[in-house]
């Protein structure tokens, strides 16, 4: 027997805009009762592919369906596509799914975390980014974040001899606005990087002492052997985690690293589906899983992945860079607040344009993120204002080695 429809989906729209130099795609789903929800459809450098997937394949088919039947709609979107999975479709499904949770929270007058089981903690411990062009700059940048109240900081630094390497800020800054322009190229040299990072963290510990939790993101650039070499040199400095040392599809290389190193590992920001994280979690090849509601099929899917990780004593730590919109960060915050096995939330402050177009109620106080207590996600969209910040074609930088060979991002 099927119960009657509670809130019929009546309209949808996908907005793209460029705010503070960053492209965002946002889906808005409206219901007959006037309640609407938002989902984050941003996939850096491939935003318009997600928009097309939404407009051509998903959204027209959910008109007239009950927004309250989130699980059924999720299974419909996921299972009925013969060509299942992948970043584009899982981001599109995630955007619709998160919008449905937003609708349900608003319709019932409760924040989304209360639909997910309620508060598991007072706030989610957040980590900030610190980046410098030199060792001194980087020490200062980490010290600044600590002074702001964060107790965990991810550090990165330009590698000496590679001035345009590792430019991790303003990743997708629109360059020429011409979609045919190739992405800007960074230079990479593994030997220089491997020599430098142990010295950098040694200086950080010398200047900042043993207390702060320090994190480092390799962005998938090493092989298993190179990563093992690095972790041996980092072990004395108590890293909170080493992130994405190796391209994550390579579970065998992670096995090698895992067996020879005692550094906690984080990976998974580019996974989308349970099948991709299964081996990493079940074989406990990592300690922190970085999948996010935005890129992994929304809250419906990330909850199941989180429960699977809990059984295997792997923590969730959702990806939260600037190229996930406030809608996606709010979804991660509601999930993090209500999920027992949640370790850390990446947090990068948004600029004023983003705050005006996508006003959000989550906040960071003394290094802890809270999603706020508004019904739904606690994020809104000023669609009129959004139209004044048009989308600009842009790509993440690519990476080439010193001899010009294309390298993994
Ligand atoms: O789009 C790529 C970025 O989201 C990514 O480089 C950020 O690695 C990242 C992180 O951990 O935030
Ligand atoms: Mg990362």
Image: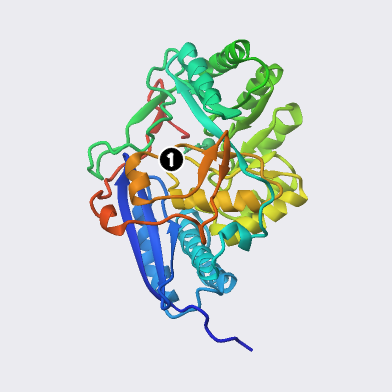
Within the image, what quadrant is residue 394 found in? top left
Q: Is mark 1 within 8 Å of ligand 1?
A: yes
Residue 93 drawn at (x, y percent): 49, 62
Residue 76 visible in this rendered orientation of the protein: yes
The correct choice, above or below, for 175 with respect to 193 in the image is below
Residue drawn where x is 59% and y is 41% of the image: 248
The correct choice, above or below, for 122 with respect to 374 in the image is above
Residue 190 visible in this rendered orientation of the protein: no
Give the residue at mark 1: 322
Quadrant holding the N terminus: bottom right
Residue 49 drawn at (x, y percent): 37, 56
Residue 22 drawn at (x, y percent): 34, 42
Residue drawn where x is 47% and y is 50% of the image: 361
Label 1 environment density (alpha carbons within 10 Å; few <14, some 14–19, many ≥20): many
Callout 1: SS: loop
Of 162 and 156, nearer the camera is 156
């Amino acid at each position: 027997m099927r119960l009657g429809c509670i809130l019929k989906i009546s309209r949808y729209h996908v907005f793209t805009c460029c705010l503070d130099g960053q492209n965002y795609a946002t889906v808005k789903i409206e219901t007959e009762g006037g309640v609407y929800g938002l989902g984050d459809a941003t996939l850096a450098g491939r935003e318009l592919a997600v928009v097309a997937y939404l407009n051509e394949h998903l959204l027209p088919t959910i008109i007239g369906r009950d927004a309250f039947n989130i699980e059924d709609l999720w299974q419909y979107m996921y299972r009925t596509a013969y060509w299942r999975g992948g970043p584009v479709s899982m981001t599109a499904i995630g955007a619709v799914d998160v919008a449905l949770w937003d609708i349900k929270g608003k319709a019932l007058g409760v924040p989304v975390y209360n639909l997910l089981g309620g508060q598991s903690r007072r706030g989610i411990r957040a980590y900030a980014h610190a980046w410098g062009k030199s060792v001194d700059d980087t020490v200062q940048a980490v010290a600044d974040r600590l002074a702001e109240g964060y107790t965990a900081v991810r550090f990165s630094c330009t590698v000496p001899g590679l001035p345009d390497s590792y430019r991790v800020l303003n990743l997708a800054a629109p360059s020429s606005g011409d979609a045919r322009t190739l992405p800007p190229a960074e230079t990479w040299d593994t030997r220089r990087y491997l020599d430098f990072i142990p010295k950098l963290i040694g200086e950080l510990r010398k200047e900042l002492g043993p207390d702060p939790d320090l994190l480092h993101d390799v962005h998938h650039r090493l092989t298993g052997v190179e990563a093992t070499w690095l972790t041996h040199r980092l072990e004395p400095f108590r890293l909170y985690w080493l992130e994405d040392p190796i391209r994550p599809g390579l579970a065998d290389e992670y096995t090698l690293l895992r067996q020879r190193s005692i550094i906690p590992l984080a990976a998974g920001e580019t996974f989308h589906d349970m099948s991709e994280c299964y081996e990493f979690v079940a074989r406990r090849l990592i300690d922190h899983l970085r999948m996010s509601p935005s890129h992994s099929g929304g809250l419906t899917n990330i909850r199941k992945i989180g429960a699977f990780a809990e059984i295997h004593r792997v923590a969730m730590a959702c990806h939260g860079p600037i190229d996930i919109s406030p809608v996606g960060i709010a979804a991660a915050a509601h999930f993090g607040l209500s999920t027992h096995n949640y370790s850390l939330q990446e947090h990068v402050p948004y600029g004023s344009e983003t705050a005006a177009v996508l006003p959000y109620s989550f906040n960071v106080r003394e290094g802890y993120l809270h999603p706020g207590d508004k019904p739904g996600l606690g994020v809104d969209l000023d669609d009129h204002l959004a139209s004044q910040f048009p989308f600009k074609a842009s790509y993440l930088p690519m990476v080439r080695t010193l001899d010009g060979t294309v390298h993994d991002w």
